[in-house]
Amino acid sequence: MREIEASQITEVVERLCIEANEHLPEDVKCALRDCRAREDWEIAQGVLDKIIENYEIADEQQVPICQDTGMACVFLEIGQDVHIVGGDLSEAVDEGVRRGYDKGYLRKSVVKDPVRRGNTGDNTPAMLYTEIVPGEQIKVTVGPKGFGSENMSAIRMFKPSAGLQGIKDFILETVETAGPNPCPPMVVGVGIGGTFDKAALLAKKALMRPVDSENPDPFYADLEKEMLEKINQLGIGPQGFGGKTTAIGLNIETMPTHIAGMPCAINISCHVTRHKTEMI
Amino acid sequence: MEKHITLPLTKELARTLHAGETVYVTGTIYTSRDAGHKRMCEALARGEQLPFDPTDATIYYVGPTPAKPGQVIGSAGPTTSGRMDAYAPTMMRAGARGMIGKGARLPEVVEAMKECSGVYFGAIGGAGALLARCIKKAELIAYEDLGAEALRKLYVEEMPLVVIIDSEGRSLYEEGRAAYLASRK
């Protein structure tokens, strides 16, 4: 049994909130540069150049890449041989978010109540997901999620008879409906299977995977490639101004589901798809 | 086609701008998003004055990050304009003419733009660090309690924008995509 202080989790979350918001992950930068090299539509080239210049400025000046510094989605994979001491885990995570958003001059974008609104003033609470895994470490991932793209996400409970075609159509329909709103070029996270809630979580987790990674199952790896290509034939282009580059990546995550169903969730993200991980 | 313009956005100036043009904008603009628009439209409904003179004004849909010491403003890219669709026609009828944001607009907004010679400019969504560089002055003028959503008066220089929908109702979202797809045939 390894003891980990709650305060250590706070420190890591604080740091990851700031770093994730100022420095775009290498995989996303690389995908943007590759897409720029392949883009042959003039207005799209201009937009991609500015997007690349923007993350370079954020890197150099240590300022947020985007003003929507998001809701702090925090994923903890906690080793089953870890004992957290010296405080409440959720409070430790929220304190990390509170400090990170304050010290990093990040925007506080969370309201207390979905209907009655009112800013919480410190960007808490975090959207916290915990998972118990073997081992005696904690893997902390922070993914600040902006809502311009979150709002364009969708979920559908398919009949199994809808099959693969149903999923393919749904992905294209969701990207088409999103159009220029989620700041394309986008990253598309697809979750298939589980229950209603699990499908949505899988879609979110798909966005935490590097954009250049593949699903380990060749069937889904092929589907990822095929759907990314189809999305990039829609012509929406960077910012919706037209062009080849509508999405820079598409990741699929799946799990078993019920004999009567085939849930499918699509979580849309923008070109500022942020995630940063640290082991404790 | 690239243009450089200086605000205010008079009716005459607005009519010279066309969908698809890149425009570098210099002058005074005002920031507002959902909560600020709601308050302004409620004030107009009560017959009250707005916190700024809306005549020929341009409104930037943005909620910036807090300024770090020594900065004029934090990162300041556009938010999704569609959430302001409920208020935009009222603002235009009160005199405001320019809107800066990103994303699709409803037909009733486009109709109001044609009626009032409005222009909808796009700033690059997600490019908050880049756009902040064009903002030379920022002053909080109202609704301080709204935090990031408070109303600010900004002075911008050579702010890179694209005309998405012009005063005749033509849209880059429709025409740009169609032109690209046609080029692939």
Image: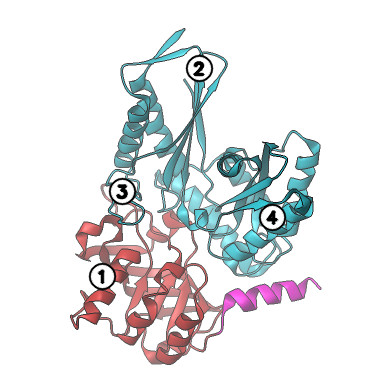
Q: Is residue B152 left or right of residue A30?
A: left
Q: Are marks 1 and 4 on the same chain?
A: no
The amino acid sitting under disc 1 is: Arg
In this view, A129 is above or below A274: above
Instruction: Please tell me whether mark 1 or mark 2 is closer to you in this view.
Output: 1
Label 3 chain ID: A
The amino acid sitting under disc 3 is: Lys
Q: Which residues are magenta?
A: B170-185
Q: Which residue is rendered at x = 78% and y = 51% of the image?
A: A161
Q: Which residue is mark 3?
A: A112
Label 2 chain ID: A
Q: Is residue A20 visible?
A: yes
Label 1 chain ID: B
Q: CA distance from mark 1 to mark 2?
A: 49 Å
In this view, A112 is above or below B162: above
Q: Kindly report the secondary structure that dominates the magenta region of the rendered protein.
A: helix
Question: Residue B8: where, in percent of width, then height?
Answer: 33, 82
Q: CA distance from mark 4 to mark 3?
A: 44 Å
Chain painted cyan: A
Chain painted red: B
Instruction: Please tell me whether mark 1 or mark 4 is closer to you in this view.
Output: 1
Q: What color scheme is it?
A: by chain
Q: Is residue A228 left or right of residue B95?
A: right
**Is A218 in front, or is A279?**
A218
Query: Which residue is situated farthest in the left direction here?
Result: B48
Q: Which residue is mark 4?
A: A37
In this view, A259 is above or below B154: above
Instruction: Please tell me whether mark 2 or mark 4 is closer to you in this view.
Output: 2
Question: Residue A263: where, in percent of width, then height?
Answer: 65, 47
Mark 2: which secondary structure? Answer: loop
Q: Is residue B154 visible?
A: no
Q: Which residue is mark 1?
A: B39
